[in-house]
Amino acid sequence: MSAPAFPPLPPGFRFGAATAAYQIEGAHEEDGRGPSIWDTFSHTPGRTLGGATGDTACDHYHRYPEDVALLRELGVDGYRFSIAWSRLLPQGTGPVNAKGLDFYDRLIDELLAAGIAPAATLYHWDLPQALEDRGGWRVRETAEAFAAYTAVAADRYGDRVERWITLNEPFCSAFVGYAEGRHAPGAREGRGALAAAHHLLVGHGLAVRELRTAGAREVGITLNLDRLHPASGRPEDLAAVRRAEVLHNEVWTEPLFAGRYPEHEEETWAGLADGDWRCPGDLRLIGAPLDFVGINFYRPVTVEAAPHGEPDPEKRTATDIGVTETNPYGTRLTTMGWPVVPSAFTELLRDIAGRYPRLPPLWITENGSAEADSVTPDGRIHDAERIDYLAGHLAAVADAVTAGVDVRGYYVWSLLDNFEWARGYDQRFGLVRVDYDTLTRTPKDSYHWYRGLITAHRARTEEPAR
Ligand code: FCB
């Protein structure tokens, strides 16, 4: 298969693929796994498209040897997966479930036998339901429970996991989950969501401490920072973009990389952000040095000023900041409705690197596109749009590297078509198609293209082929 122009990524640049536990594993009641907020949410009528759940998903829990074989054949250096907290600790705290621990042992060993470096995300949105019942991320106890769970995982897998990611996209956990309510646990809150954001960061800081104590190799966090543009030069749109910067980016980047809370949080949340959930010493804990930062990028965002949905600041959700999203790009949209603008990826990477001198090296921990794939009579999936998207975004990463940004590797989202949260099984992001009736896996053209790209990179940089 002919590959588009190859981006000049540097020698030693690593390629991988990513997934997350609830999106692929299935086996939701097997071997002692406890329920998570995503089980509860997806089983609540009206929450996910068509009532889709992760009960079976891709059945990766049973089919992981086949999936690791697909990764080996793909030729990736690394695989990013997530550990389901409620498989290890079914109630979130307390007794450890030996069978849950064993599953990730088997997965990790299978990866290592295939020459693939494991990267483990500790929290990809699947909070044990028992902890949500006690307040979820609104309360500090959840951050402490996260640290205890991290210690269990680090103790067991720390000798074999190359890269640890504490949280995946805390923006979504805090704001999509506790303010917009589009994700589990489906809450629509102001203070609760801001407390959740803070406790996620505290949980991250405590988890980093545990990972260091256990001698973990590389420790980082994954953020979905947004490249934000104002819809116009009008002062109200410029003010709207400032508020959106706080909500989308600075809530995370300022405490993590600058040791402070966002300067403009007051004008964004009118006093709601600075609550009694902030304790002395938290900023020091949250800002502990990291080995890398994971960046997930899909699309740029343009915003303009809009009336608040709720006039009373005390009653607003944390995402009601007087901002609305517009789409002036005029480019192709993926089936998620997301504009395809690779240059925004370069801008984002350059911007974050320029803004924070203490920023550790970056890894792209997710990037990919959902497309309207179809199986042609020859049994193939000719997903030219996905190849085009990936080639464009890898070239954008290469441009950032050329401009001096330290990016070490790239994990494509995703290895498999999977449960796309509230969008159910409608959105296909995989390099490998999953037939949800038979659970058969079929590599798409993009899989073969990515494999060719990795092989070409190794040949060009004279790394041994695998
Ligand atoms: C990210 C999530 C990931 C996947 C992609 C499409 O926000 O981290 O699980 O759903 O979007």
Image (tube, helix red, strand yellow):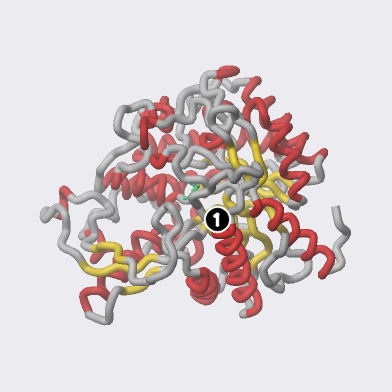
The residue sitting at 23% across, 55% down in the picture is: 320
Which of these two is toward me, 435 or 466? 435
Q: Quadrant of residue 50?
A: top left
From the top left corner, tell me how far across and down residue 24 is, in percent: 56, 35
From the top left corner, tell me how far across and down residue 347 is, in percent: 50, 74
Which of these two is toward me, 428 or 14? 428
Quadrant placement of the N terminus: bottom right
The residue sitting at 29% across, 39% down in the picture is: 187
| SS class, disc 1 | loop
Q: Is residue 221 visible?
A: yes
Q: Quadrant of residue 185?
A: top left
From the top left corner, tell me how far across and down residue 186 is, in percent: 31, 38
Which of these two is toward me, 380 or 75? 380
Is label 1 within 8 A of ligand 1 (CB to nearest ligand atom)?
A: yes
Q: Quadrant of residue 207?
A: top right
The residue sitting at 58% across, 37% down in the picture is: 434
Query: Viewed as shown, does residue 336 lie left or right of 318?
Result: right
Q: Is residue 211 visible?
A: no
Vertical order, 167 against 136 (above or below): below
The residue sitting at 43% across, 40% down in the picture is: 421
- The count of marks equals 1
Q: Which residue is mark 1?
A: 368
Q: Which amino acid, mark 1?
A: Gly
From the top left corner, tell me how far across and down residue 225 is, in percent: 46, 61
Q: Residue furthest front?
A: 377
